[in-house]
Image: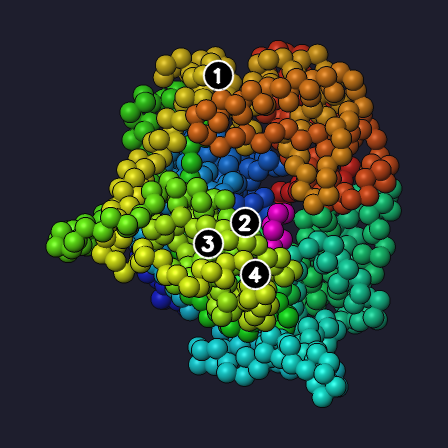
Amino acid sequence: MTSSGRDFILDRFQMDAIEHLDAGRSVLVAAPTGSGKTVVAEHAIDQALRERRRAFYTAPIKALSNQKYRDLSARIGSSRVGLLTGDNAINADADIVVMTTEVLRNMLYEGRALDDLAFVIMDEVHYLEDTFRGPVWEEVMLHLPAHVKLVCLSATVSNTDELAGWIESIRGATGCVVERRRPVELTNLYAVGDRRGHRLHVISTLVGGEPNSEGHHFDADLRRGRRNDRGKREKSPYMTPTRLDVLDHLEGDDLLPVIWFLFSRRGCDEAAEQLDRAGARFTDSAEADRISAIADERLGGLPTADLAVLDTSAWRNRLERGIASHHAGLIPAFKETVEQCFAEGLVRVVFATETLALGVNLPARSVVVDKLTKFTGETHEQLTPAQFTQLTGRAGRRGLDETGHAIVPWSPFVRFEQVAGLAGSKSFRLRSAFRPTYNMATNLLQRLDAEAARALLARSFAQYQADTGVARLEQRLARERDRERGLAATVAELPPLDELRVDSPDAISDAVGRLRPGDLVVDDDGLRLAVLGVSWRKGGRARVRLVNESSREVRWRLEELDAAPHTIGRIDLPFPMAPERIDYRQDVASRIRRAGAGHSARSRRRRTRRDDPRVALERTRNEITQLERRARRDRASIAHRFDAVTDVLRNRGHLDGWTVTESGLTLAGIYHEADLLLTEALTAGLFDGLTAPELASLASCFTYEHRSPTPPPDPWFPSPTAMQRFRQLEVLSQSINATERSAGVDETRSPDPGFAPVAHSWAAGESLGVLLGRNDEMTAGDFVRNIKQLADLLGQLAANATDPSTAGAARRAGDAIHRGVVALSGSVQAP
């Protein structure tokens, strides 16, 4: 079978998905990156056009929306395609409109007529697990008119049946099509540097689907601690390979172009600069000329002064050598230039953050994942299998490469089994991030009564998954109750044991809560252990991580403890903490043995033993109580959250009973994570009477968030009036947070004034060079992104302000900041 207008044979999964659409069903298609899911979307678009109806194509980010707009315009003609994002509004009434998911959600809440809408294509639907933006996807699915069919395109996840089952429960008949084969086979490689002769070892990570047996020989901790003939500690002969060595290997094996993923913007730039300084070149003169022409075209609209500030000359020099970096710290014009050059095969090495894996479609022959951990802003976390697969999904270009290659360099902090585990993992369960918000509640209650609103929220994927979880809890409860009956019968035949002591669950929980890293405790057999840490989870559950005197790692679950742990002493733990390494655990065990505390504990075994039926019965009853509590909580978890949110709204005057008040109507028009605080600031007049620069500076406190590990600067505003309003805003924020704490609702983020001086100066006409010169830590890309977020918020303030002068000031502020490099960024011209 060939698709209409195409000269290639469709894959089986594409044909199956198209059959579902032709039969009038919605469809969920889960397949790897680059496998051709777009063909299914295009079939739905063609069907809508044949029926003289419309289709919407939603994407999670503006860059994807812009790319899809250009692709569809080239395919069916620009007169039939529109684009709606925060930056662009082109041909909004077209037959086919590409938009971000938030734009469609806002349309639905505004009550737009969608009678002629046949399909909504939701690209990257696995985004619904995103903490901040995921709920929007579920809002759209729940609120779309019943006649609209969904085409949901997703990465491969392990619970597609569950997701499809939920979609069918809210949208009607839904087909589920899963393709697990990659369009291009992937080879995972492990690259190890060798100090002996500066060699590079490159081995396959998996052999026959199993970890390569050679890989474990490179683990650093197998040799750590050995001493040579002179008694000196040996250094591992292996090391992290240099980037030049890895790139030489890739170039020698014809494995370029490559995307090298690093999780640091500065790291990306430094890697590109290092390669440039080393004299690396991957282009010939003709390719360099073509790159120069693309750069001229892409940067043509930027003012000369801005180009100088952005160090464009050095950036272009690297680009013409076939080397580039790509991250959110670059202005969009730079990123788009890199993307076009890479897509044309001109740039051969791109150092990128993970945003490239989530953005536009730019496959490479090879991918390097520099490290398997990334800094989240608070801590370093290991990549999840889903994140690793997203990155390596860029390896291999369909129609160009028979095999894609994913390389992980050796690290002294990561064992080979961890690398192989990620490479071989096939389990990526999608979890809903849906939660009722203040804006959502006011929009629902404008159209529905309380019970109908609860009923609609109960149809969310979050509640669907919770209900599935409750069913599993009920099965566990049945088993535990059977166990309780058996234990009760056994205990009834035992003689009384007066000395038996079983601490209450609260006493055990309190004792666990007091444990600190380095505390020494005793187990049931009188053996001493050192506490490494306590992690608390939802529902009051906790895990205690320990190491005993035999160097073994031990984990206690709070619900399994029958007696409160008591601290018998302390030791200083080695730093940095690395309990997965045997040498670290041996060091901890040695420190336990050297500690004098608790030796007498060895001579007495605690009389309360885990295998005593009385203890087992008490523990089982505690487990039953906890399971029953969890089941009650999860049965109506979304409804409980909705009720808590409406309690806050009622307390703050945005609801009168279940009726939306005038201020609540304002809240319904504010789409922002700080929607409640913004609404109250607006209705309290905190934005009234301000000049455009003052209003811009105050509004920036809602859009900016300090993420650097260094402490934020003290609040400062160029205008005393704006500073006074910010202090009032802080008081208002604290008042709202107090109400939220009382209701058990997550607190709204406090306003952050860190960008206020920049916003004020830019709105007042200051140049880009002066602003970036005053702010060494701010990149041009960060500046543009923050200004664009501010511009979106100013537009909302202008639309929702009841005072005409405030609305006018917000519009003037929005116009004032939309200039220069900001105006050029993200703009899309109709083809």
Mark 2 or 3, closer to the camera: 2
| Label pair 2/3, CB-CB below 8 angstroms | no
| Within-10-Å neighbours for mark 4: few <14, some 14–19, many 20+ | few
Residue 195 location, quadrant: bottom right
| Residue at x 59% of width, y 23% of height | 733
- Disc 3 secondary structure class: strand
- Disc 1 secondary structure class: loop
The correct choice, above or below, for 157 with respect to 666 in the image is: below
- In percent of width and height, residue 483 lies at 19, 54
Horizontal arrangement in the rendering, residue 498 relative to residue 212 (left or right): left
The correct choice, above or below, for 361 with respect to 710 in the image is: below
| Label pair 4/3, CB-CB below 8 angstroms | no
The one of 831 and 432 positioned closer to us in this rendering? 432
Start-end of magenta stretch: 375-384
Specify whether residue 281 is painted magenta: no
Q: Which residue is mark 2?
A: 516
Kindly identify the amino acid type of the residue bearing the numbered disc 3. Val
| Within-10-Å neighbours for mark 2: few <14, some 14–19, many 20+ | some
Horizontal arrangement in the rendering, residue 309 relative to residue 193 (left or right): right
Horizontal arrangement in the rendering, residue 155 relative to residue 267 (left or right): left
